[in-house]
Amino acid sequence: MHLQTLANRSAQLAITNIAVSVVLSAKLSVLQRWFFGIDTTLQWHKWFGRLGFLQVMYHATYQLQFNYERQGGDVFATLTTNVRHVTGTCMLSAMVVLILGSHPLVRLLSYRLFRWTHLSAFFVLIMFGCLHHWSFYLFYGAVLVFWVTDQIDRSFVAEACTVESLPGEIVKLTCRVPYQSSLLIPGQFAFISFGSTSWIKAWFHSHPFSICRMDSEVTDTDESALIGQQNKTMQARISRPMGRPYITNAGTEFGDYNTIVLVAEGMGITPWISVLHYIKEREHAIHTKSVYFIWSVRSIDTFYAFEKEFERYQFTDIDVHFQLFITGPSDPEEDYSIPSYIQLDIENRPNYEAILLKIQQENEETVLGICTHEETMVRVNNIGLLYSWALKKERFEL
């Protein structure tokens, strides 16, 4: 009886933790708008989900082991003894799919597969959970209303969305947003789905894109399966801008600091281009005096894809220092077409310790923006903490 009680309590805790995980998965709730950034709530979403999975595993293994002995070692009979065992088996399978389908490797190989497995398994979990035990109605009724409201309110129809192929296997999307562009803040991102204006299809087919530049249009740049389509116009659904791109919870922005240091790898330059746009618009009203770009790319083609974006921004009162590192193999005889204001380093990786030390010695009131792979992010983040700089981290992973 003692083990039965522990198994039941484990199930109750699992219901609670999974419910909290569902609440944290909403991307436009009051939590993200007023209290925490979406990167924080999504990390909590993962850990509450993992904790719930472990508690489900304890509850399920106890029940299955106990029933296996009663059924005389018949596996099929063990899983299908009654409605509770059938629904419990289906729920356990759904939880396994949720955990495996959300692995970073799955998202890297196919973001659409991640969306399909995650949403499908979630609906299976809720449906069979309500058949499994009455307590699911109590916990998930309000949570589902919260989640569905967030999903419906998230996206809008964009009548014209232009897709352009750029060098370096990069796609540029230009959309006229169906809401006020004043809602957009540098460092935010949006979900976009193509080929249909249905919000139901947008659940499964949408993909996150960083907002690169805002004027009368929204320009997003990211890698996508749409490579090779030249200037194609199509209908799409675009979400509201997401994320709280402030430096601190008090609402400080990049322009509140004398020095801005932006570190990027590959496509990680995208959110920092939006910061350039922000600085250009407020050049004479912000405190910023110096901007440092440290950008690492495997191929020069990645720079060429963004070159026109950089040409848009010429500053009179702000010093811009740009270091470009090409880390991949290169042709010694190749003539790189690089503007004179960019310091180019070929086949070398940046020595962040030396670069940031020099910046620290020459500047005060510094904010450090990082959008890199995890290993580099940890390394650069630790240097920023050593110098007591304000930190803003952007991740490839959503």
Image (tube, rainbow, N blue to C red):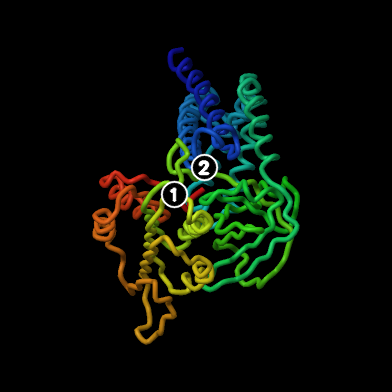
Q: Is residue 220 left or right of residue 338?
A: right
Q: Position of residue 109 (x, y in %)?
A: 52, 58
At a point 45% along the width and 36% down the height, the residue shown is 249
Q: Residue furthest bottom?
A: 333
Q: Residues within 10 Å of mark 1 (few under 14, many from 20)?
A: many
Tags 2 and 1 touching, CB below 8 Å: no
Q: Amino acid at mark 1?
A: Phe
Pick the front one: 115 or 216: 216
Residue 244's tag is 2
The residues bearing labels 2 and 1 have C-alpha atoms spaced at a distance of: 13 Å
Who comes first in sequence, dot 2 or dot 1?
2
Q: Amino acid at mark 2?
A: Arg
Q: Quadrant of residue 30?
A: top right
The residue where tag 1 is placed is 254
Residue 267's tag is none
Can you say whether 125 is above or below 233 in the image? Answer: above
At a point 58% along the width and 66% down the height, the residue shown is 171
Of the two numbered discs 2 and 1 in the rendering, the one whose residue sits closer to the viewer: 1
Pick the front one: 243 or 43: 243
Can you say whether 352 is above or below 29 in the image? Answer: below
At a point 39% along the width and 71% down the height, the residue shown is 342
Q: Position of residue 2 (x, y in %)?
A: 43, 13
SS under mark 1: helix
Q: Position of residue 106 (x, y in %)?
A: 51, 52
Q: Is residue 246 left or right of residue 133?
A: left
Pick the front one: 70 or 327: 327
Q: Position of residue 293 (x, y in %)?
A: 39, 61
